[in-house]
Amino acid sequence: MTSTASSNSKLPPKTSVPQSTQYHRLHSLNWTINWPSMAAPESSTATTAVNNTLRHAFGNVLSFFILLLIGVLAFSIRLFSVIKYESVIHEFDPYFNYRVTQFLSKNGIYEFWNWFDDRTWYPLGRVIGGTVYPGLTLTAGTIWWFLNSLNIPLSVETVCVFTAPIFSAFASWATYLLTKEVKGSGAGLTAAALLAMVPSYISRSVAGSYDNEAVAIFALIFTFYLYIKTLNMGSLFYATLNALSYFYMVCSWGGYTFIINLIPMHVLLCIVTGRYCPRLYIAYAPLVVLGTVLAALVPIVGFNAVMTSEHFASFLVFIVIHVVALVYYIKGILSPKMFKVAVTLVVSAGLAVCCAMMAVLIALVASSPTKGWSGRSLSLLDPTYASKYIPIIASVSEHQPPTWPSYFMDINVLAFLVPAGIIACFSPLSDASSFVVLYIVTSVYFSGVMVRLMLVLAPAACILSGIALSQAFDVLARSIKFQLPGFPTNSEVDAGDSNPITVEAKNNAPKTDKTGEPSKDRPSRKNKKKGKEQAERPSVKGKPEKKRLLVLPMGASILALLLLVLLSAFYVVHSVWAAAEAYSAPSIVLTSYSHDGLHVFDDFREAYAWLSHNTDVDHKVASWWDYGYQTTAMANRTVIVDNNTWNNTHIATVGTAMSSPEKAAWEIFNSLDVKYVLVVFGGLVGYPSDDINKFLWMVRIGGGVFPHIKEPDYLVNSFL
Amino acid sequence: MARSSGKDAQALFHSLRTAYAATPTNLKIIDLYVGFAVLTAVIQVVYMALVGSFPFNSFLSGVLSCVGTAVLAVCLRIQVNKENKEFKDLAPERAFADFVLCNLVLHLVIMNFLG
């Protein structure tokens, strides 16, 4: 009896399992260990309770510190570019965001909403307030303003450079919360640690990569977390928070259409598989209404929130869930016979009305040439669409399909753990785990269409791998613990809900010696020393639930544990290497190693500085659209076309000018008031992405609008 | 067949009425509110069909505020209904507070969007 009290400290720690999941079974091969269970004496329940509270407190504190460390890890792994080069903004798009943030910090928010930019797309100009996703700039502007009001004088550039690492720390905490809702806090911590380091996310959120995805991924994961939390708890408060978080996502990135299509898909899946419950209604219906109004508030979305096909799925499922809710309600208040009558009546009458309405809707949608979808969404649904109809979308390198090695480069070991995670989600299958499975399946498809969308796959892969790894560690560690020599015999595992776990030992004579005397309440089991039956035994006090623990052999467990740790080590090494070598290049500064040491090419910034010092403020500069944002931000000169690529004809004009002989090109540029033409040539140092390499795209895009530019004229016909 | 379906419809209608009469008063009040909100939305849609949809944001905000408050009232009804076993440990005051908060957020956004 006394051994029971001392044995409590060696019991396995209770991980917090959400209410909606049941205890999960750990299936192993053929080994079971049987210990006879022992009833707990009354005197030790108090000690048990105190020990449990202590253990929970210790676990919570440990979780908190682990999360803090994960945040620090996520922040610091993205600082390689600042250490190796300098604290500078990378690439092309971030320069536009930086310029907008500068304007916001200088002129305030009202000027920002009403800003018409005349220094780009000359002579058309661009309405910045209505064509930019404001989330990123408003976030960075708020951080800058807040820090300055505390008298911490950080410059706007510093805030912009470090926004992405800060938000990646938030994103890993959001992943912890989401995975905790699905499978428990152990899986949550693993998933958070994996997300902090996954190379795909690092590539778009290094310090200096000041782009929309830096905050959008955090918003995405946080919105999903709040949705799952509402689904699990059925609270309208979390539904409100969910809608607000969805609003932040709409502000941040065009990828918000992923959320507003995935959640209706999940709701439909739950309805179709018979898992409709009132919590599903509370989780979904307020989100649709509030989310649509909030999305319509953002100027760049505006009325598209109710008029484009990207949102129709949510309205359709909104109607479906109301019909289903009504059916369930009527079923609840009628007797079964009357319900059948109701069904026959409604089906016959309602079907006709339904068909009529559907016909009207389909006619409306089919009347628009693209069936209401935008070009980018169409190119996602049909991967060949862009190359046939919209060469600009096809020409962006981020929009190409990924190659197989890029999966291994970007999510590394997780590619192998994801299938294990999917299987772990099915045992048991809850609403939350079915959502995660749906998320990974859709994101795998979309990542196969565009390499840029590997970024959306990364959190899903981390969540599922975290679940798989956590389950594996659970089973292996438990196997080792229960087979350690000297493990107390009459152990009652208090799972906090006071369900004693009967762990049964059989099969090994030496093991039986270790486990001690069998319980006197079950003499029949003493005789079953052999055999592989795994029938359930009633617990001693007749408690309703029990848990069957199956363990693996000791040697195999230790080896498997070591191998899993090695696997994680490979992942960490690869992630750090990818962050340091592959994804930290700022693109405006190039380095090369030759026999006389390190060469740093700062040609881009030198060129823009030359422009800014040697030309007049009003002079117009023409270049290919890649360099538009950088020219306006760093050289402060008016450009003809830039990376926004909203006007295909204007870009085609510049492309035609670049592809024409000198006299024709001079005429075109003169009509646009151009004074200087910027061309990038990389032949001297072997820089591979210069304008000569992009020349055929200029021809194609120009030829798409001006038929006298034909691509075969610019190719050498080497087959004749 | 038409006669038997007519009789069936009458019997169905009667049983629906008796079953609904058995619901508690507070739920009936919520149902009345939902009906009022949906009716207001329908009136707005009919008005738009007559008069035209300019300015569109006013129409959208009007309709969505009615639909939104109806949806929230249905959620409140779900949470307050004593027959729902899932919500038996949720205090009705808490459910009502959530309802008010969500309505506040909805109408703040609507007022901003009204133009």
Image (cartoon, rainbow, N blue to C red):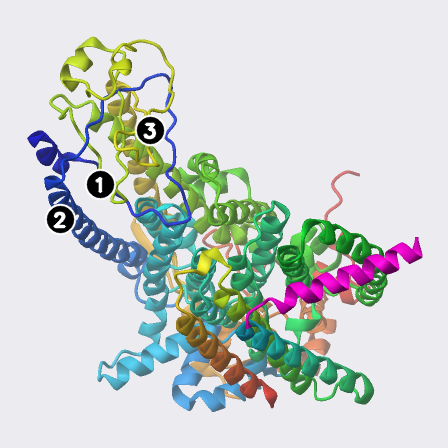
- Give the CA separation, mark 1 to mark 2: 14 Å
**Which residue is pictured at 16% across the width and 23% down the height?**
A484
- One can see residue A432 in this view: yes
Q: On screen, A687 above or below B32?
A: above
Disc 1 and disc 2 in contact, CB within 8 angstroms:
no
Looking at the picture, how far across and down is residue A541, in whole percent? 26, 33
Q: On screen, A625 above or below A155?
A: above
Of the pair A424 and B70, the residue shown nearer to us: B70
**First to last magenta residue range:** B1-24
The residue pinned by badge 1 equals A13
Given the image, on which type of amino acid does mark 2 rest?
A: Val
Tag on residue A548?
3
Given the image, on which type of amino acid does mark 1 rest?
A: Pro
Q: Report the quarter where the C terminus of chain A lies.
A: top right
Q: Main secondary structure of the magenta part?
A: helix
Q: Compare marks 3 and 1 and give the one earlier in the sequence.
A: 1
